Amino acid sequence: MKLTKTLTVFVAAALASAPIGAAAQQSPTAQPTAQPSVNAFGIPDNVTIFGTDNPNLRTATAIVNDFVITGTDIDHRLALILASARNEVSDEERGRLRQQILRNLIDETLQIQEAESLELAVTTAEVNERYAGVAEQNFGGDTAQMDQYLASIGSSANALKRQIRGEIAWQNALRRNVIPFVNVSEEEVNEVLARLEASRGTEEYRLGEIYLSATTENQAAVMQNAQRIIEQLQQGANFQAYARQFSEATTAAVGGDTGFLRLGTLPSAMANAARQMQRGQLVGPIEIPGGYTIMLLLDKRQVLTVDARDAVLSLKQIAIGFEPGTSEEAANTKVEQFAQFVQNLRGCADADSANAVLGASVVTNNQVQARSLPEALQGIILDLQVGQATPPFGSIQEGVRVLMLCGRDDPQEAAGPSFDSVMEQIENDRIQKRAQRYLRDLRNDAYIEYN
């Protein structure tokens, strides 16, 4: 993977492998559904603020039960967010991000301290093992190379290791104080399976969500915050990274991924919006009970119905590159020659000759799910016969390539989720809800001093 890959995605990759909290919720209905009482404290509409009313003017550090969160800690986490933004972030936006990061670091500190109080402290070996796993996924296992990348974006290896430590610590605490007390009956699982069978053929939607809770008092501020997030995402910021940092949904741990769900399980405003969305489309902020949500349509399918996009393909990629400074005319000539060469190939056995004849690179992958390909290519690939290739695609900057179909295993009749997988999903959903209450109680009991 290129070094330009943002670290926030590395973090998501590292933590997605966690055994606890890695499953997405079935429905955002886990969020608060009751609107707060109007002006519960009897505060007048017109108030006078004594002192500064801008929290960004305060020094963004804190002491959490005697543990100091420094400005450097915040700077290094901020670098992870900024690495995912393709455009310059304003000073105002940076200030807002720093405040959110401070809140995240406070929660993370409480989680680590809770594990330590339970004599479940995370060892350095555990952290290093998870860190090496992230390096394996992104840098071929070269942790030194990942260290250098982290430093190059203004962050550090310690910043990522600290986040990993917090995740493992929280998993340990949940295993002790939450998971043993979560039970799911056979009747509940069977009811879910029966509902799935009854809904066979209806559409399911897989969404990315960023949920922000709001009260009557802070509704306008939360709305503005959501709009700023939307602007950053539209400018190319990484959705998973922003969901992990800002979303208050249980899906934040997996980058906002809800998994596949039916629209009937969603608040009506979300369901109506999702029904009109195309894959890859971003919408929001949408007002729902308890706050606002931002949605990204990741995928959709029909319940318990065979989907051709689940076919597993054997593909060969044949790619050519261009020297720096190559003119558009020269590039077009080379692409025409490349297309003619591919058209004359008699099948996958001939594809390797592209290296000797054109200097092209040839890469084989025998386990590609059609669904994982860019949507523009999915229909083309699925219409090919074995031995046929797609039209050339790409650019002068990134190179031009074709995909040749060398084999295809079509999906069998959809059997639906197993009893065990449904039970696991229900358990994980309940664990996440109790985990939110657990963390809320830790915040209430903590001694936090802001500097």
Image (cartoon, grey):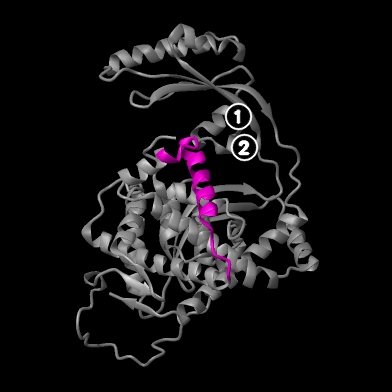
Residue at the top extreme, as displayed:
357
Q: Are marks 2 and 1 in contact (CB under 8 Å)?
A: yes
Q: Position of residue 111 (x, y in %)?
A: 50, 68
Figure quadrant of residue 247:
bottom left
Q: What residue appears at the point 57 percent right and 50 percent down from the top-left corner?
A: 17
**Residue receiving disc 1:** 382
Would you call the spot at circle 2 few (<14 residues within 10 Å), some (14-19), or many (20 or more)? many
Q: Would you say residue 26 is visible in this rendering? A: yes
Judge by depth and name the residue closer to the eye, 64 or 433: 64
Residue shown at 76% from the left, 46% from the top: 415
Give how far across and how far down residue 329 sits, in percent: 29, 15
Say whether residue 309 is left or right of residue 199: left
* Residue 15 left/right relative to 239: right
Q: Which residues are magenta?
A: 119-144
Residue at the disc numbered 2: 309
| Residue sitting nearer the eye, 314 or 340 | 314
Instruction: Locate the C terminus and report the quarter of the image it occupies.
Output: bottom left
